[in-house]
Amino acid sequence: MILLMGLDSIHCKVSYDRKALVINGRRRILFSTSIHYPRSNPEIWGYLIKKAKQGGIDVIDTYVFWKGHEPSPGNYYFKGRFDLVRFIKTVQQAGLYAHLRIGPYVSAECNFGGFPVWLKYGPGISFRTDNEPFKMAMQGFTNKIVDLMKSENLFESQGGPIILSQFENEYGLSSKAFGAAGCAYIDWAAKMAVGMGTGVPWVMCKEDDALDPVAPAHLTNSLYNTLLHNLWLFLSFFFVHVGEYTPHPYLFLMAHKRFAEFGGPIHQRPVQDLAFAVGRFIQKGGSFVNYYMYHGGTNFGRTAGGPFVTTTYDNDAPIDEYGLIRQPKYGHLKDLHTAIKLCEGSLISADPVATSLGNLQQANVFSSTSGGCAAFLTNYNAKLAARVVFNDRHYNLPPWSISILPDCKNVVFNTAKVSEANH
């Protein structure tokens, strides 16, 4: 993931440093969740966002779907399920932040990657490369969305909820395929985005070979196999200001769940494993987690993309396709968020110090200069529990689990232990 800001960003209320996003001068540990406005009806948006907030979520993340907003060249549609302004204002009314992922290529298991089909028939057009017809169309749509958000004062620099925007999406493989033309395109796209002067950082996901003013970023697709299920970790290592870059390990994470296919298995991931992965990311110094999806919703009409993708985009999410809470996933993640927020003062002030507690056990400790202390005690053994000594105290760690100690003494949460209240 790459983060960019315009040259006038000195006046912006949203910035970043090596530890975290900084909002109004304060570093933040943020939990984000993907809810795609066209995949549910406007009547339920408020409910979904409210439930996300009650689950400990800080940021609502959504793609912007070009094909729904410009069904024919120059004819724009922002009504019904595509009322983007209403959706972002609903986020604002709930007191949450927004991450607007404009793309305009979004993938998202959406037919044609979210592009309108008419774009394919433009004279001389070649998608997502240094091609003038495509760049002109892309810039036109991106400008349209940015101008719409500005007109409603929805960027955080204007007092709105949008703290991040994204251009392009998952471009790494395409960049390599296009070679020099791909590099030229992404360099142009970065300058185009920065030039729009939104006053908030721009993000680019999964691109590791961009040109100035976009410094290179590396993302790992770390797929680990356990007795449970899998997690994709998209970890960004560089965040970018125009003209310079600095390495920032482990700042962003996207927790991804596989979509369903007709005739295929229903993928379900135990929440204990998901909580372990999020806890592991935070204990390494991460500060921004996004769940994809938190509410998946429905691929209405003929919008599902890819081979045999189902109309449901549920993705085993904490809030299911119909808006119902899925336990224990929703409640256990809520408890995880609460526990991590209790550690926030130490997490944003100090780097973790790792100490071995055994062959497969480790402590990650954050000790701030103000005297705060938080610890994460991890048992990486997937089969056996462990009894460890930390700060002259004994702790029992279940298999494949992390215990969170906001004061370096008392355990307030363990990723493997689901509260009876959440069943």
Image (tube, grey):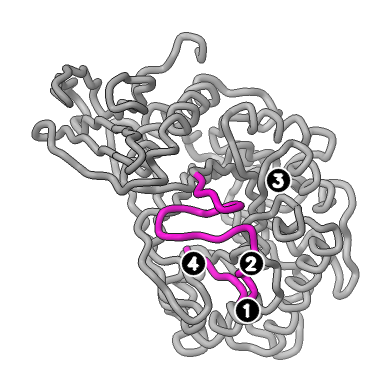
User: Is label 2 in contact with label 3 (beta carbons under 8 Å)?
Assistant: no
Residue 83 located left or right of residue 95: right
Query: What residue would you read off at disc 4?
Result: 2
Mark 1–mark 2 Cα distance, whole angstroms, equals 9 Å
Upstream in the sequence, badge 2 or badge 4?
4
Residue 299, label in figure: 3
User: Is label 1 in contact with label 2 (beta carbons under 8 Å)?
Assistant: yes
Query: What residue would you read off at disc 2?
Result: 105
Mark 2–mark 3 Cα distance, whole angstroms, equals 17 Å
Q: Residues within 10 Å of mark 1 (few under 14, many from 20)?
A: some
Residue 65 located left or right of residue 398: right
Closer to the eye: label 1 or 2: 2
Give the vertical position of 190 relative to 59 (above or below): below
Upstream in the sequence, badge 2 or badge 3?
2
Residue drawn at the location 57% of the way across and 31% of the way down = 56
Closer to the eye: label 2 or 4: 4
Mark 2–mark 4 Cα distance, whole angstroms, equals 16 Å
Residue drawn at the location 51% of the way across and 65% of the way down = 170
Mark 1: secondary structure: loop
Closer to the eye: label 3 or 4: 4
Q: Amino acid at mark 1?
A: Phe
Mark 4: secondary structure: strand
Mark 1–mark 4 Cα distance, whole angstroms, equals 21 Å
Query: What residue would you read off at disc 1?
Result: 127
Residue drawn at the location 51% of the way across and 73% of the way down = 241
Mark 3–mark 4 Cα distance, whole angstroms, equals 29 Å
